[in-house]
Image: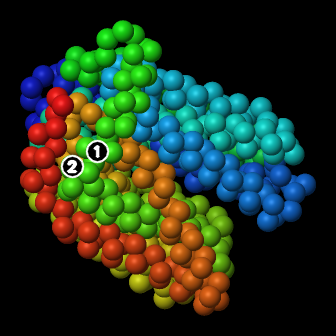
Amino acid sequence: MRFGSLFRESARGKRRVLAWAFYDWANSAFATTVMAGFFPVFFKQYWSTQLEVTESTFLLGAANSVASIVVVLLAPVLGAIADRGAAKMRFLVFFAAMGIVMTGALYLVGQGAWAMALTLYGLAILGFSGSIVFYDSLLVEVAEEPQFDWVSAFGFALGYLGGGILFAFDVLMTLFPHWFGLSGAAEAVRLSFLTVAVWWAVFSIPVLLFVRESPRAGRAAGGWRQAVRGGFAQLAGTFKRIRQLRITFLFLVAYWLYIDGVDTIVRMAVDYGLSLGFEANGLMLALLITQFVGFPAALLFGRLGQRRGPRQGIMLAIFVYLLVILWAYQMQESWEFYALAVAVGLVQGGIQSLSRSLYARLIPRDKAGEFFGFYNMLGKFAAVLGPLLMGWVGVLSGSPRSAILSVAVLFIAGAALLALVDERAGQKLARSLEGT
């Protein structure tokens, strides 16, 4: 099945989809290079060398937590306001600009200035996470329901490819700084923050030029004040609607459990590898492998979602994750970590993209902003229970292997609840609330 065949209605429709997906290509550079790659290491080795190791770890964790909590509190409210005022694009621009500026400003932070580095990093996370709320909600604006699986997967696939390409370049620049006329690795890492900001800004331009909200989204009259008042009122009504949409609520609980498992593996994999004595450079290479495998794999999952349904694709991904955990529990050699990186890359983009497209089917289209606000709120709560579970089991057992095995509980519980989700019944309920 070819990409173009899915968008026969017009060249304009294809352009909207491509422009929307390129925002994933743009912002994934921040997720890969800054959040997962360089910032945690550089914070310890450059900005906070005067602090105790445990203190720097605490501060880094606190910055992540505070930024996530702010997004959790703001996302549903902002989503509701955006729905009332046809302002999804405006909010996306605002948060993306915040993330871009703060990321670029990290280049200017000198050695030892840990407080400034953390402040800019926290604001960059807020900009990144806030923009995702409105980016996700625009899925219903650029695609029709039969196309949700493919379009969502296409966005994630471009994200893996774009993030991987820039990360590979920045890793090369860090390993061989003299090739680029740089004084050393520290200057290369600082420059990498600037490359992320430029990449993010340039590839955000298509979504700004070619994606527009449909007139049905702009229901509020009386300007921004009325939109804000109406947004808060709409948020209050969301809780009532979620109770009415029982199947949607059931999916959200299932999603929170299994995506917590996914994010725990993403965030704890390098730490787990280090605890087994593997080399740090090899672990960074494994991260790169995951990115590039994730590109074609996400596209394949999009086709699987169209043919078999998104729920079946998610179930397959959960099964693979369970196999990954069992393998990680007993692995002994470094090559096994690379093999697991490939396995995770095969399903990580798929489970994320199909979750987004399944959820888009289970919500009222004219309330996408507020409902995706709750969806992203749960995503920010993810990787809270999993790391705590790993830490608790690790302390009690004294074994990192037992700790990683405990994450399987999240996938099993999520799969059990997902099996109860009736997609057709959920769609019917969601359509009944449109326009109310």
Q: Which mark is residue 240?
A: 1
* Amino acid, disc 1: Lys
Its colouring scheme is rainbow
Residue 159's place in the image compared with 333, above or below, is above
Q: Is residue 320 left or right of residue 305?
A: right
- State yes or no: discs 2 and 1 in contact (Cβ < 8 Å): yes
Up/down of 160 relative to 323, above or below: above
Mark 1, secondary structure of its residue: helix
In front here: 228 or 284? 228
Q: Amino acid at mark 2?
A: Gln
**On the image, which quarter does residue 394 sit in?**
bottom right
The vertical placement of 202 against 40, above or below, is above
Q: Where in the figure is residue 96, as x and y percent of width and height?
A: 51, 29
Q: CA distance from mark 2 to mark 1?
A: 6 Å
Residue at x-position 33% and y-position 61%:
253
Dot 2 crowding, Cα within 10 Å, few <14, some 14–19, many 20+: some
Q: Which mark is residue 244?
A: 2
Give coordinates of residue 55: x percent, y percent.
81, 60
Name the residue rendered at 21%, 55% in the picture: 246
Q: Is residue 320 visible?
A: no
Q: Is residue 191 left or right of residue 304?
A: right
* Numbered circle sitting on residue 297: none
Counting other residues with Cα less than 10 Å from the Cα at mark 1, is it few (<14), some (14-19), or many (20 or more)?
A: few
Q: Residue furthest right?
A: 50
Q: Residue at x 9, y 26 (%)?
A: 9
Horizontal side of residue 376 vs 49, given as left or right: left
Residue 312's place in the image compared with 47, above or below, is: below
Q: Quadrant of the rendered structure where residue 3 is?
A: top left
Q: Name the quadrant containing residue 387.
A: bottom right
Callout 2 secondary element: helix
State the image coordinates of residue 111 (x, y, percent, origin top left).
85, 43
Seen at 41% across and 30% down, the residue is 232
